[in-house]
Image: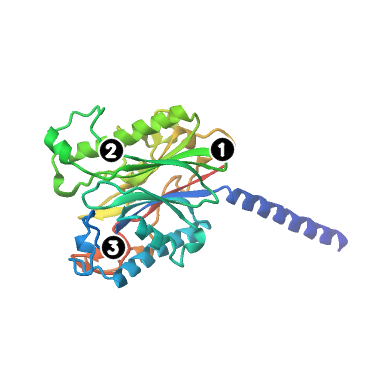
Amino acid sequence: MKMKRIICILAALLLLIIGAEAQKKGQQNYVIGFYNLENLFDTYNDPAKNDEEFLPEGKNKWTDAKYQKKLGNMAKVIKAMKDENGAWHTLLGVSEIENRLVLEDLVMDPQIAEANYQIIHYDGPDRRGVDVALLYRPDSFKYIESESIPFTFEGSSIDFIMDQEQKDYFRTRDILMVHGTIDGEHFAIYVAHLPSRAGGKKGGNQLRDRGGEIMYDHAMKMQQKYPGIKIVCMGDMNDNPTDPSMAEYMHGKEHRSEVTDKDFFSPFTSMLKAGFGSLAYQGVWSIYDLLLVNNALANAPEGTFEIRQLHKKGYYGRVFNPKFLTNQQGQYKGTPFRTFSNGSFIGGYSDHYPTYIVISK
């Protein structure tokens, strides 16, 4: 009996040690994600923004009650991802937000207030009046600097179809770059919302190619300035990872083994080919909500942060698509449960699913 008791005590101690090590390892896991919030506008008229549709008297009859419902829905999604991962996002890029105010309202929502998200946002030149931004947790990400990178045509390798007048008129979202550290390691985070496909505008593909080119060129300069820096490029690219903007101009590679210091690992490429999607249009699924990581994060030196697998089939990305985010009936059954449908407010979430990666040491 005495020996049996000793064995039981030793077994219990072993479980405690294993649990402590697992907890320790879990503390080094960090979630980095992106979410298109689908027109998160406040209810106030801003003469500098194209927000007329999102006013109480506007086309969408955008009342405070609808706005509060929208905020609560966005917070619910962020909280649900925290529940799935056991940790809040360290970094969450967002798009289709009107201004800083809507983000201040969002991060104060009771469902996510404890995360203490801080905001990095610049007012941009987009004609629709929407911007990108980054939410970060100051206890895990130490902010150093940021930059709003304008969309320009200067210095491009692309032979544009657009004439000079069209170029001068064109406006779109800036690309946000945020530089900081996680556990002492330098990170550069890019958040983009590349030009839309709407209307099949002449040269539209080239505009997204140029967006990829701008982001890639800036990232390469950051690698030169900060050797070994870990880089994550995220956003609504309005392109699949197999399209030229991502595969060619961003040098996105499907497999980690292909990645060099001049490339990015594109974890959602294999997922797209396997049938995953973050949005659906006319019955066709795409993954426009992308995250790509540089070689320093894809094939990291031992003991430093590296992207890790999130799926039993070896995928490194996650499309977060629980049942409550998905239409369960009707014409759009099985697709993201959005805020508006056919011009009517239906109280959903977004027409995009959020996506994320996890890094760990």
Amino acid under label 3?
A: Arg
Would you call the spot at circle 1 few (<14 residues within 10 Å), some (14-19), or many (20 or more)?
some
> On the rendered image, what quadrant is the N terminus found in?
bottom right
Confirm or deny contact between disc 2 and disc 1 (CB under 8 A).
no
Q: Residue at x 22, y 52 (%)?
A: 128
Amino acid under label 2?
A: Gly
* CA–CA distance in space, label 3 to label 2: 26 Å
Q: Count the labels in the image.
A: 3
Q: Nearer the viewer, mark 2 or mark 1?
A: 2
Q: Which comes sooner in the sequence, label 3 or label 1?
A: 1
Expressed as whole percent of the image width and height from the top left, the position of residue 125 reads 25, 46
Q: Secondary structure at mark 1?
A: loop
- In this image, 323 relative to 331: left or right? right
Residue holding disc 2: 211
Expressed as whole percent of the image width and height from the top left, the position of residue 119 reads 42, 52
Q: Is residue 247 visible?
A: no
Would you call the spot at circle 3 few (<14 residues within 10 Å), some (14-19), or many (20 or more)?
many
Residue holding disc 1: 304
Determine the residue located farthest toward the front in the rendered image.
Answer: 47
Would you call the spot at circle 2 few (<14 residues within 10 Å), some (14-19), or many (20 or more)?
many
Amino acid under label 1?
A: Thr
Residue holding disc 3: 338
Q: Is residue 307 visible?
A: yes
Expressed as whole percent of the image width and height from the top left, the position of residue 11 reads 75, 56
